[in-house]
Image (cartoon, rainbow, N blue to C red):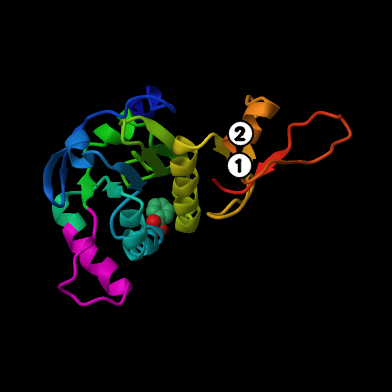
Amino acid sequence: TGLTAAMPGVLLGDVFPNFEADTTIGKIQFHDFLGDSWGILFSHPRDFTPVCTTELGRAAKLSGEFARRSVKMIALSIDSVQDHLAWSKDIVAYNGEAPDSTLPFPIIADEKRELAVQLGMLDPDEKDKDGIPLTARCVFVIGPDKKLKLSILYPATTGRNFDEILRTVDSLQLTAQKRVATPVDWKLGDSCMVLPNIPEDEAAKLFPAGVYTKDLPSGKKYLRYTPQP
Ligand code: BEZ
């Protein structure tokens, strides 16, 4: 359909669009919603679907972890606010919470798929009964400067891992402050890599806890670890 033809999307480093949207907490202007916080926007193919329900349930359970990291959460699905509110009751029940509980984050109603198109979030393989693509499972992490810091895109049929999303937030927030990078499977507290563009003498000053360089067959000294600064 024409909906997929010109999917613009948002690239790393772009200022995230300051869109206006209807949500379960009323109309928002995205940048005002974020304020000075980090933000995470995660999209869902459709309300009242199984994988999405498990994802939003888990996201709700982790809301304290996101709040601790000063990350404002917002979900998006292509149904109406009314549907979102009815579906939210299912999600809190799925989480085993009281019927009067509410989700700790709003859900955007993108009924016309305008944001889905603008943000490059459509999944061409999953269509509704009219043959129109559903939203994929996008994760966007936005920094306090409103720029896109990370995006992950899953198809509708693959649920996300929210532990991994929190792990990426930890890495993004650390590497925004310190001149390190985080290696494979890194978790908060693990050793980090000294950035390749930092000369040896400067690295020694920057990382007083010590820099350990692993010897490699190439003789190049690039595998440099330091305790998490
Ligand atoms: C789900 O959330 O379960 C789902 C939604 C759309 C397509 C496939 C799965």
Tell me the crowding category of disc 2: few under 14, some 14 to 19, or many 20 or more residues within 10 angstroms, Cα based: few
Read off the residue under disc 2: 205
The amino acid type of the residue labelled 1 equals: Pro
Taking the image as drawn, is residue 217 in sight?
A: yes
Discs 2, 1 touching: Cβ within 8 Å: yes
Residue sitting farthest toward the left = 26
Q: Is residue 152 magenta?
A: no
Q: In front: 219, or 49? A: 219
Q: Residue at x 31, y 36 (%)?
A: 144
Residue 124: x %, y % from top left: 44, 37
Please determine whether, in this image, residue 124 is positioned above or below residue 70: above
| Circle 2 SS class | helix
Provide residue 176's location: percent of width, then percent of height. Answer: 45, 36
Numbered range of the magenta stretch:
85-105
Q: Work out whether residue 157 can be spotted.
A: no
- Residue 88 coordinates in the image, percent (x, y): 23, 63
- Which quadrant does the C terminus fall into? top right
Would you identify the image quadrant in which residue 18 lies? top left
Mark drawn on residue 166: none
Q: Is residue 35 left or right of residue 175?
A: left
Q: Which residue is mark 1?
A: 208
Q: Which quarter of the figure has residue 177?
A: top left
